[in-house]
């Protein structure tokens, strides 16, 4: 594979499992106050909140950092959760939500939250600021269309669905998108997102049904055609990909949103020249895109030999989303198709630990070449679906191993996945994931000369000594 496969992943470190929420909270405050690293602070606070989900202090701090990052909808989701589920007495959440909605341009919702704060906390710490905000909101709302309340509701739901989709919470996204479609039957964006959600969850039949529905009810919907092209690409329907690419190549949309969609879609399927045409023209027109826009611009420019432009675009990616560091196009040259299966599984697993779901989902070379790889990918992209296939069990085993190793080291996981693939080829069940990971861990320690007892290992992985011994023999035989 050339140089280390995952130098770019910066060897994600996993802190021992016995750390509590306060530990991560202290580290988050240091990252926020001293280092001014909002991305790192938010990740540490998410860990703290996951360990202590009823700690309103952790949650409110995370919401404030999301606001600073410009993630207003995510911030409001947390603030709503505090009021409704954790601590209704935290009335200041209404004021913070009002500010977030104002930033989003949802003035009606902002007004409702600001009014709620005035009612519930007339002597609150933020009451003067809240009164000023209310005055501004009344001015902003004077010229609003009477139907703006419904518009606000739609935008909020759409943003929530988008957030769920991006974070792999597919079941929740599907449920909310169905709700949007029922309330707004001609909101085609929801149909397209619902189609994507079904596709990523593995239900290709339903995904295509909603795409066809959009194209039937809203003939010529460009987003639907672009999504259909992506589906064909992932299904390796080369003839259909070629035909639809030729059709879309001659489309010249007026709307910036459509040009962006075309460019990103062409980049995703590896048609970099077509992608560059649209993405570069948008940039020249002064389009201020997000990190995803500059991600695809950088990849397109790099593959066309425009290295300086690719690197300047990548600088924008990292500025807006530091977690993308390590996935530069010039560091990602080797095709996954040329890697062995255990190499691909290792790559995907470590990428998942860096929360690079978009790269896993969209990278043009990442096409499952076996059932176990497909199940493995599906579990990463839809962890809430409670799958029971070999690929899901393989992922559980990898997580159990990582928990004890406290790190994701490339060499170790290459060996681990190689061993587990031999287990699968030998028609042995991977269902007892903890037993397989315990056996591999014990053999690994034994080979490295470290002193560790079977009793200690069995206890750490939650299996019996006799089970460990049984699986140890199988691992050594393989």
Image (cartoon, rainbow, N blue to C red):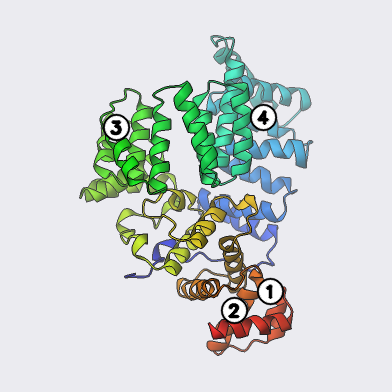
Q: Earlier in the sequence, mark 1 or mark 4?
A: 4
Residue 350, compared with residue 159, is above or below; it is below
Element type where label 2 sits in the image: helix
The total number of labels drawn is 4
Tag 2–tag 4 contact (CB < 8 Å): no
* Real-space CA distance between mark 3 and mark 4, rounded to the nearest whole angstrom: 50 Å
The numbered mark at residue 247 is 3
* Real-space CA distance between mark 2 and mark 4, rounded to the nearest whole angstrom: 51 Å
Q: List the residue tagged with mark 2.
A: 441
Compared across the picture, whether 456 is left or right of 200 comes to: right
Q: Earlier in the sequence, mark 2 or mark 4?
A: 4
Quadrant hosting residue 375:
bottom right
Q: Earlier in the sequence, mark 2 or mark 1?
A: 2
Q: List the residue tagged with mark 4.
A: 95
* Real-space CA distance between mark 2 and mark 1, rounded to the nearest whole angstrom: 10 Å
Residue 417 spot, x, y in % from top left: 50, 71
Element type where label 4 sits in the image: helix
Give the residue drawn at x 43%, y 67%. 341
Tag 3–tag 1 contact (CB < 8 Å): no
Q: Quadrant of the N terminus?
A: bottom left
Residue 382, compared with residue 449, is above or below; it is above
Local crowd size for mark 4, using a 10 Å CA cut-off: few (<14), some (14–19), many (≥20) = many
Local crowd size for mark 2, using a 10 Å CA cut-off: few (<14), some (14–19), many (≥20) = many
The numbered mark at residue 70 is none
Q: List the residue tagged with mark 1.
A: 461
Residue 70 is at least partly visible in this image: no
């Amino acid at each position: 594979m050339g140089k280390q496969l995952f130098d770019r992943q910066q060897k994600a470190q996993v802190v021992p499992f016995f750390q509590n929420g306060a530990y991560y909270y202290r580290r988050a405050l240091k990252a926020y106050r001293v280092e001014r690293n909002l991305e790192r602070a938010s990740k540490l606070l998410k860990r703290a909140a996951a360990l202590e989900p009823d700690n309103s202090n952790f949650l409110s701090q995370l919401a404030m950092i999301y606001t600073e990052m410009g993630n207003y909808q995510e911030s409001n989701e947390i603030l709503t959760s505090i009021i409704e589920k954790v601590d209704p007495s935290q009335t200041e959440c209404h004021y913070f939500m009002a500010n977030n909605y104002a930033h989003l341009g949802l003035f009606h919702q902002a007004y409702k939250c600001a009014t709620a704060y005035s009612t519930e906390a007339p002597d609150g710490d933020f009451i003067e600021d809240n009164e000023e905000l209310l005055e501004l909101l009344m001015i902003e709302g004077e010229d609003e269309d009477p139907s703006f309340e419904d518009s606000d509701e739609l935008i909020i739901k759409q943003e929530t669905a988008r957030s769920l989709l991006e974070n792999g919470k597919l079941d929740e996204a599907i449920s909310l998108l169905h709700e949007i479609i029922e309330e707004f039957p001609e909101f085609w964006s929801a149909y397209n997102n619902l189609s994507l959600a079904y596709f990523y969850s593995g239900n290709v039949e339903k995904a295509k049904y909603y795409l066809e529905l959009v194209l039937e009810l809203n003939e010529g919907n460009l987003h639907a055609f672009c999504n259909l092209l992506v589906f064909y690409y992932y299904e390796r329907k080369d003839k259909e990909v070629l035909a639809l690419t030729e059709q879309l190549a001659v489309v010249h949309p007026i709307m910036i949103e459509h040009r962006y969609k075309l460019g990103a879609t062409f980049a995703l399927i590896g048609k970099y020249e077509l992608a560059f045409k649209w993405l570069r023209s948008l940039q020249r027109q002064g389009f201020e895109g997000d990190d995803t826009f500059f991600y695809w611009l950088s990849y397109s420019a790099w593959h066309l030999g425009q290295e300086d432009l690719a690197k300047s675009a990548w600088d924008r990616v990292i500025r807006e989303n530091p977690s993308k560091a390590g996935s530069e196009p010039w560091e990602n040259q080797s095709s996954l198709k040329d890697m062995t299966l255990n190499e691909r599984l290792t790559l995907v697993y470590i990428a998942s630990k860096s929360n690079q779901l978009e790269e896993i989902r969209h990278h043009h070379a990442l096409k499952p070449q076996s059932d176990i790889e497909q199940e493995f990918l599906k579990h990463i992209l839809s962890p809430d679906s409670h799958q029971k296939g070999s690929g899901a069990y393989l992922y559980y085993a990898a997580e159990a191993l990582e928990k004890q190793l406290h790190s994701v080291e490339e060499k170790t996981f290459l060996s681990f996945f190689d061993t587990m693939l031999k287990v699968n080829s030998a028609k042995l069940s991977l269902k007892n994931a903890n037993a397989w990971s315990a056996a591999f861990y014990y053999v690994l320690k034994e080979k490295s000369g470290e002193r560790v007892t079977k009793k200690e290992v069995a206890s750490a992985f939650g299996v019996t000594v006799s089970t460990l011994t049984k699986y140890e023999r199988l691992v050594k035989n393989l």
